[in-house]
Image (tube, rainbow, N blue to C red):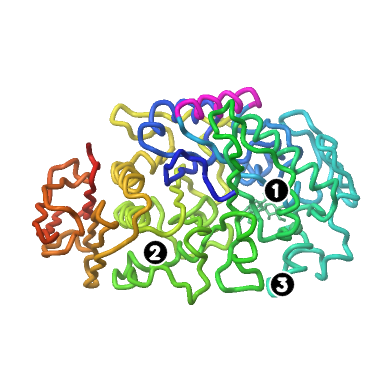
């Protein structure tokens, strides 16, 4: 439940809207060597909306739990999970189980299942669900049946989120159906899930689903008794009745306050000293699932917010580097595609067919894919985070323009907002010479017997130093 089952690795990348065939290849050619695990987009059958030009959010309107989506078929999905597992890259699925499609929709999904939510109909024969499996209207204290009062948990959890047909999670039938979907993922070899819209589900309903799950399969390399890793999407920005700590018993929780905090800290380095504010109610470290931005808030969805994204590369590198250097939470990196409008789907071959990810000769991506996870700073900081795992931050120093700290006596990190710094600092490291992995060892520090070193940074675009025992080896 709390172990990402990622063989000790500390970071996952969200390969937003990638096809299964591309992810399988990426596991083998990049993620395994770079030390990542990976989150994928919802694999279930979903609505198809040509009238909205096939937006990315089609996949947040499931039609059944058949594994047939814009990213590929069940056979492609199984092949991806198995190939990734065999190179040590664990896969986490984005699971949409609070609801099915929006109201007023009908048609046939890409895996062949029909759906009808027009009027009072709630027909999803691919599961199957019918009207009695959706939250009764008298359970929702809202005038129009939609979520509109975040101060009232019954409103948030029993009403329809942006008119999405809300599953009645109190029913054993619904719990069994969702658990059946998850047990299918487990049998394939998926290591865990993001629970989409968990804030809109009752924690006891989530617990009841999880209590029905099998252990992870030993034939996919999981130690006997391994549990499905769970991180729950709970957007708690101190603006409503639902708090992240209600969900600690059922897994990790997304910590969206971290997104605003790191954005603020990069703008004003002095604020980095107060990054984790338990007075704000931020989740405890062993339950916090953190990221600088996600697929929603990078495009103003899911509540949006002031977040730094790949569109400001210099700030973004600092934000991700700091996130990976410090010791709070379990971390996820975003891997995006470029977009002109906030609904736009992934790069396509025309219409609904998602384009391949292009890998350029220099290792960057083309064809409209950003691939932040392939940027040099991100790759190196993932190496750093994996190697210093288990240590805590120490020797913290911050003068408002530059910041530095050690990770126990294993690693040392420094960053300079204006692009340069020159300071004698305590590194916490044993005496010796250590090279900066961020600039591929072009610079280094000499640590004396007392643990101090002269720390110089002179690099405007990537003003970051990371050294550690074992780094760059
Ligand atoms: C989430 N949080 O709990 C995500 O933060 C949010 O982005 C997801 O919505 C939501 N869960 C449901 O999974 C996304 C997208 C919405 C989109 C929904 C459903 O951000 O814009 O809503 O997926 O596809 C769309 C339309 C909306 C319409 C709805 C239902 O944008 O206008 O509501 O479909 O037809 C009438
Ligand atoms: Ca609900």
Q: Which of pointers 2 and 1 indicates the residue nearer the eye?
A: 1
Residue 247: where, in percent of width, then height?
Answer: 63, 61
SS type, badge 1? helix
- Residue at 44% x, 30% y: name it: 26
Residue 30, percent across and down? 38, 31
Q: Earlier in the sequence, mark 2 or mark 3?
A: 3
> Is 194 in the magenta?
no
Instruction: Name the residue: 60% across, 56% down.
Output: 233
Q: Secondary structure at mark 2?
A: helix
Q: Which residue is mark 2?
A: 263
CA distance for labels 1 and 3 = 28 Å
Q: Which residue is mark 3?
A: 149
Instruction: Judge by depth and name the residue closer to the eye, 432 or 233.
Output: 432
Left or right: residue 62 compared with residue 216? right
Q: Is residue 76 magenta?
A: yes
Q: What residue span does the magenta drawing correspond to?
A: 73-87
**Residue 464 appears in which quarter of the rendering?**
bottom left
Between residues 62 and 299, which one lies in front from this camera angle?
62
Residue sitting farthest toward the front: 224
Q: Residues within 10 Å of mark 1 (few under 14, many from 20)?
A: many
Q: Residue furthest bottom?
A: 279
Neighbours of disc 3 within 10 Å: few (<14), some (14-19), many (20+): some
Foreground pick, 235 / 383: 383
**Quadrant of the image for the C terminus?**
top left
The residue at the point 36 percent across, 32 percent down is: 33
Image marks 2 and 1: residues in contact by CB distance under 8 Å: no
Residue 210 disc label = 1
């Amino acid at each position: 439940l709390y172990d990402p089952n990622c063989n000790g690795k500390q970071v996952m990348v969200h390969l937003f809207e990638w096809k299964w065939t591309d992810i399988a290849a990426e596991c083998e050619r990049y993620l395994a060597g770079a030390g990542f695990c990976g989150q994928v987009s919802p694999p279930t059958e979903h609505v198809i909306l040509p009238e909205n030009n096939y937006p990315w959010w089609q996949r947040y309107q499931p039609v059944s739990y058949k594994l047939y989506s814009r990213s590929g078929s069940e056979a492609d999905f199984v092949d991806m999970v198995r190939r990734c597992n065999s190179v040590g890259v664990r896969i986490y699925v984005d699971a949409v189980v609070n609801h099915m499609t929006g109201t007023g929709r009908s048609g046939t999904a890409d895996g062949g299942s029909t759906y009808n939510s027009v009027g009072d109909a709630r027909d999803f024969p691919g599961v199957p669900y019918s009207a009695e499996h959706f939250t009764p209207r008298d359970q929702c204290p809202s005038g129009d049946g939609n979520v509109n009062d975040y101060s009232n948990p019954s409103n948030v959890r029993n009403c329809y989120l942006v008119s999405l047909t809300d599953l009645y999670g109190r029913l054993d039938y619904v719990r069994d159906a969702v658990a059946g979907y998850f047990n299918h993922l487990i049998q394939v070899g998926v290591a865990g899930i993001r629970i989409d819209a968990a804030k809109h589900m009752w924690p006891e309903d989530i617990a009841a689903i999880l209590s029905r799950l099998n252990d992870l399969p030993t034939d996919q390399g999981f130690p006997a008794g391994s549990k499905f890793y769970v991180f729950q999407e709970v957007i708690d920005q101190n603006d409503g009745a639902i708090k992240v700590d209600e969900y600690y018993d059922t897994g990790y929780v997304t910590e969206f306050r971290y997104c605003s905090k790191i954005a603020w800290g990069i703008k004003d380095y002095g604020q980095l000293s107060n990054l984790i504010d338990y007075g704000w109610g931020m989740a405890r470290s062993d339950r916090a699932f953190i990221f600088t931005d996600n697929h929603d808030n990078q495009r103003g969805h899911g509540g949006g917010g002031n977040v730094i994204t790949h569109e400001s590369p210099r700030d973004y590198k600092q934000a991700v580097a700091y996130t990976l250097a410090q010791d709070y939470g379990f971390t996820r990196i975003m891997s995006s595609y470029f977009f002109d409008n906030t609904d736009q789907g992934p790069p396509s071959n025309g219409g609904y067919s998602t384009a391949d990810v292009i890998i350029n000769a220099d290792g960057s991506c083309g064809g409209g894919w950003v691939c932040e996870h392939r940027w040099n700073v991100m790759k190196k900081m993932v190496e750093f985070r994996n190697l210093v795992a288990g240590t805590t931050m120490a020797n913290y120093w911050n003068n408002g323009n530059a910041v530095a700290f050690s990770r126990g006596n294993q690693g040392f990190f420094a960053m300079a907002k204006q692009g340069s710094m020159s300071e004698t600092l305590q590194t916490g490291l044993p005496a010796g010479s250590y090279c900066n992995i961020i600039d591929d060892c072009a610079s280094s520090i000499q640590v004396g017997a007392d643990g101090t070193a002269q720390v110089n940074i002179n690099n405007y675009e990537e003003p970051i130093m990371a050294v550690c025992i074992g780094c760059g080896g």
